[in-house]
Image (cartoon, grey):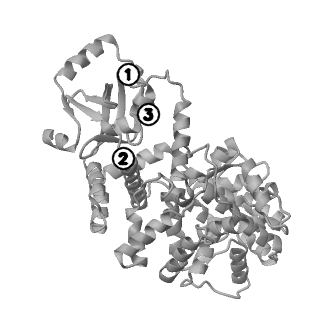
Amino acid sequence: MFNEYDFINQYPKEILFTLYVHMVDDSREYEKITKKKMLFAIYESLIEDPTRFDGYVSADALNLLKNILHQKIEFNHESIEDYMLIRELQNCFLLSYNGIAEGFQIPIMIQDVVRSIVITDRHKDLDNIYDFLNGVLLVRGQINRDELKNIYDNCKPSYLTITLDQALMSLPRIFLKINEAAYVYEDTFEHPAFYRETVFSNYSPLYIHSWETYLSVGKFGINIYNPILNEFYKKLKKLKSEFIIDDFVENFVIQTQLSLDFDMSRIMQEFVDIESDIDRAVSLYNEVVREIPRWKFKGDPISLVDLDKIDRITDFSQDDKNEEIYCPCGSGLLVEDCCENQKELMKHRAILGEERAQLFYGLYYMLIHKTNQKYKLHPHFSNVERFFDRLSQPDFVKIADKFFDSPEIITEYINQYTVQVTPQQHEILTGFQHAFKKTFVALRYENQKLQLLDEKKRHIYSVSGIVSGIALNIPQDVLPQFIETRLIPLNKEITYDIFMNQIPVIIGPNMRKELKKVEKKSKVIRNIEELLEID
């Protein structure tokens, strides 16, 4: 028999648990409570103290819910504004969709309390604080709670009496925006897409944000008080719906964070839609990306960054390192002259380099996302960052295996984006099509590349890292060793699909002798051309 609360089974347990632990006193452990019990506990918390609605959902969304209950309005399915509010209500389980016949339903358990709620100024203040915190998160990428408190206290308007601690206690929905583990274990606000190793820790930001500018970033995704970004946003509004702008701006801002020099070719079509003249589109693109706050520079846009100063910071950091640390690849060189030296790694094609690595990761993660969308191997989110934030490594590997076993995924992508696929993208897509997974014997490093032996086929694959030398994770002194991975052949090198699983099997003296014999009879393969020759 149909149960009106069965809709909760459509949601990942992780999302429900995040709200549950921030809403319910004496919450139970993740493994010891079901989705429905968490849902009922959240509802009971809202019923016992209706003021908790203030930070649980926005005033606009709650007002829409109240109007529907009072039969003052019906859903306007053509309204982007209503659609976004409906999505918000669904994301916090106040609205369910039970099929075309029944349509949207407000759970009976909470209908009476929703009818009785009066939206207060406190609710609107908490909405502003939510946008402010979201803005700080998008500007900085990561910030510890003490620094966040200083920013909050210095920026908040005098009429706001709510402290940061009070706000965090009252805003469970903000925790859906952050890396929960970083908050629990490190007391840090961190965007799920944040990449810690990119940040210049000694950098002092130049741009001074205000309550209004943080609020702007939280609401619109960009600082509309910046004249260039304001003009860009106005052009977007003329051509795009607010819903499309919301998703586009978020993806655009996140992609700019990966490196100083980045490839945004997949975004360029959006700029061509805004500025049909290709030269003006490129000019607009270049202007905008220079004004996006960069997590690497603690929120400063590139237009404010003194690149000479960055070089001095980098040089200082390198000089401060211990010069007696030798490279784990066994070259006999110092690590900064070998597997930590980007120029040396690029010289030997032992890594893909920043631009190609970003393109590699971008295509790989996008196609993993498309694979899950098609085959539903894991609860799916259209928001890519949210999807991967809730994806464990075993689940990622499961979807990756399905992707590489489904050649139609790449074929469909190429057919859909034939005009936009660049030669660099085509190289990586072709590599994906010829990828293969098996267990190898990792022998040693040569020119910072890991030599993987396929005993049966008598092939040795010379494997490059993606963004860093492989020896930094698998040092020479643990080799030879059995390793399971998937190899991806490219035009000038062979790389792997992110994971290398080390198999804890001891290779004794006799086996080493046999491996040496096999190695002497094996052919070395360095790229896709050499791979296809033997196939």
Give the labeled residue for mark 3: 340
Q: Which amino acid does label 1 sit on?
A: Gly
Residue 265 placement (x, y as % from top left) = 37, 63
In primary-sequence order, the first of circles 2 and 1 is 1
Q: How far apart are marks 3 and 2 (CA)?
A: 31 Å
Q: Tell whether label 3 touches label 1 (CB within 8 Å).
A: no
Residue 176 placement (x, y as % from top left) = 64, 58
Task: Give the SS element for disc 1.
Answer: loop
389 vs 205, nearest the viewer? 205
Q: Distance between the residues labelled 2 and 1?
A: 33 Å
Task: Give the SS element for disc 3.
Answer: loop
Task: Give the SS element for disc 2.
Answer: helix
Give the labeled residue for mark 1: 330
Res 487 seen here: no
Question: What residue is drawn where x is 54% and y is 57%?
Answer: 386
Q: How far apart are marks 1 and 3 (CA)?
A: 13 Å
Q: Tell whether label 1 touches label 2 (CB within 8 Å).
A: no
Q: Quadrant of residue 90?
A: bottom right
| Image quarter of the C terminus | top left
Residue 75 placement (x, y as % from top left) = 61, 83
Would residue 390 be found to the left or right of residue 264 on screen? right
Res 242 seen here: yes
Q: In which quarter of the image is residue 533?
A: top left
Give the labeled residue for mark 2: 401
246 vs 383, nearest the viewer? 246
Number of numbered tags placed on the structure image: 3
Would residue 316 be found to the left or right of residue 367 on screen? right
In primary-sequence order, the first of circles 1 and 3 is 1
Q: Which amino acid does label 3 sit on?
A: Glu
Count residues near mark 2 (Cα–Cα under 10 Å), then give few for <14, some for 14-19, many for 20+: some
